[in-house]
Image: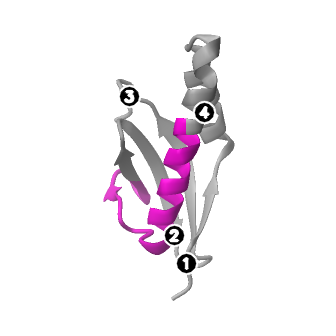
Amino acid sequence: MKNAKVIFSPAVDEAILRHAAYAAPEDVPAILDFTFELQKRLVRTLETAPLGGKKFQGNLRFFPMKGYVFLYEYIEVTHEVHVVDMIGPGQNWR
């Protein structure tokens, strides 16, 4: 079977920028590198195991990784994973 296509919503980019906004300017590059590395790892996981996360609400699933939680939905018809949000450590997301 072909790998699923993983698509990140603009909300994920916004979450990364919100997280970086609270950091000291000299720490921003490290934060961006870390979150982009998380995204790459998430893509490698979800493209081969799109139903690997735990069920959350309706068709949404969640995948925790290094203190962050990614919310996503697998669209079987198109074989796509839509990552709809990224919640940072310490944030109440349930």
Instruction: Give x and y (percent) for residue 61.
Output: 40, 55
Mark 2 touches mark 1? (CB < 8 Å): yes
Q: Which SS class for mark 1?
A: loop
Question: Label 1: which residue?
Answer: 3
- Magenta range: 34-61
Q: Is residue 49 magenta?
A: yes
Instruction: Give x and y (percent) for residue 26.
Output: 62, 15
State which tag comes first along the sequence, 3 or 1: 1
Q: Amino acid at mark 2?
A: Glu
**In this orientation, does residue 57 appear?**
no
User: Residue at point 55% right, 78% down?
Assistant: 3
Q: Which SS class for mark 4?
A: helix
Q: Nearer the viewer, mark 4 or mark 2?
A: 4
Q: Say which of 40 and 13 sits in front.
A: 40
Answer above or below: position of 49 versus 64: below
Q: Amino acid at mark 3?
A: Pro
State which tag comes first along the sequence, 2 or 1: 1
Looking at this view, name the residue that lies furthest to the left.
54
Q: Nearer the viewer, mark 3 or mark 4?
A: 4
Q: Amino acid at mark 4?
A: Leu
Quote the CA–CA distance across marks 2 and 3. 24 Å
Asked where in the image residue 66 lies, by quadrant, the reply is: top left
**Badge number at residue 47:** 2
Q: Nearer the viewer, mark 4 or mark 1?
A: 4
Quote the CA–CA distance across marks 3 and 1. 29 Å
Q: Which SS class for mark 3?
A: loop
Mark 3 touches mark 1? (CB < 8 Å): no
Question: Label 4: which residue?
Answer: 32
Q: Which SS class for mark 2?
A: helix
State which tag comes first along the sequence, 3 or 4: 4
Instruction: Give x and y (percent) for residue 91.
Output: 39, 25
